[in-house]
Image: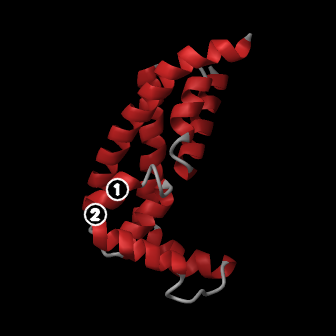
Amino acid sequence: MQEEILKVVTIILLTMLKFIAGPTLGFAGGFSLLSTILITITGMMCSVFIFTFLGKLLREKVFPRFFRKKRKFSKRSRRFVTIWKKYGIIGVAALTPIIFTPIGGTILLSSMGTPKEKIIFVMLLSAIFWACFFSSIIHFFGAQILPSFMQ
């Protein structure tokens, strides 16, 4: 029982950093499709909640201690603004699991002044869609491909 809990917590923590970790590690850990989807959604939404509600505190108090102040208009920040202007809230949320990390997408939406409730809602929809999509593909093709590697 403790092993299973440790697996779940580890997958959630890794999914908070990189979304694809949820479906791949859920499959590798032997979890069912539904369990993998729920673990993946939980991991992404933990990131979203932390960085939505504690984002300002982290930006003002924690980050300055570890990172030097960078120039405002770096290549990366320009790319974020371009994506924001081109795709808006829904586009950023949809691209978060693919291009950004859950942390990056949440910080981008927060820094653009998106209301917290809206961030949580669109990120939840994105997490549900992409968790179902990636987990289904990995569970279907993983079961097909994995036995050939085991020989």
**Side of 111 where 74 appears, left or right:** right
Residue 149: which disc? none
User: Picture coordinates of residue 27 (x, y %)?
Assistant: 56, 24
Query: CA separation, marks 1 and 2?
Result: 6 Å
**Residue at point 60% right, 75% down?**
62
Front residue of this view, candidates 8 and 72:
72
The amino acid type, in three-letter code, at marker 1 is Ala
- Who is closer to the viewer here, 10 or 83? 83
Q: Are marks 1 and 2 in contact (CB under 8 Å)?
A: yes
Task: Determine the secondary structure under disc 2.
Answer: helix
At horizontal 59% and vertical 28% (from top left) the residue drawn is 5
- The structure's colour scheme is secondary structure
User: Which residue is painted at 31% across and 55% down in the image?
Assistant: 120
Q: Which mark is residue 89?
A: 2
Give residue 11's position: percent from left, percent from top.
Answer: 58, 37
Q: Which residue is mark 1?
A: 93
Residue 110: percent from the left, percent from the top?
37, 70
The furthest residue to the right = 151
Dot 2 surroundings within 10 Å: few (below 14), some, or many (20 or more)? many
Q: Which residue occupies 47% across, 34% down?
A: 39
Q: Amino acid at mark 2?
A: Ile
Q: Is residue 140 visible?
A: yes
Residue 21 lies, with reference to residue 102, above or below; the image says above
> Which image quarter is the C terminus in?
top right
| Left-right relation of 57 to 65 | left
Does any portion of residue 31 appear in the rendered image?
Answer: no
**Front in this rendered view, residue 44 or 137:** 137
Q: Residues within 10 Å of mark 1 (few under 14, many from 20)?
A: many
x and y, in percent, of residue 116 in the image: 30, 64
Image height of 47 relative to 133, above or below? below
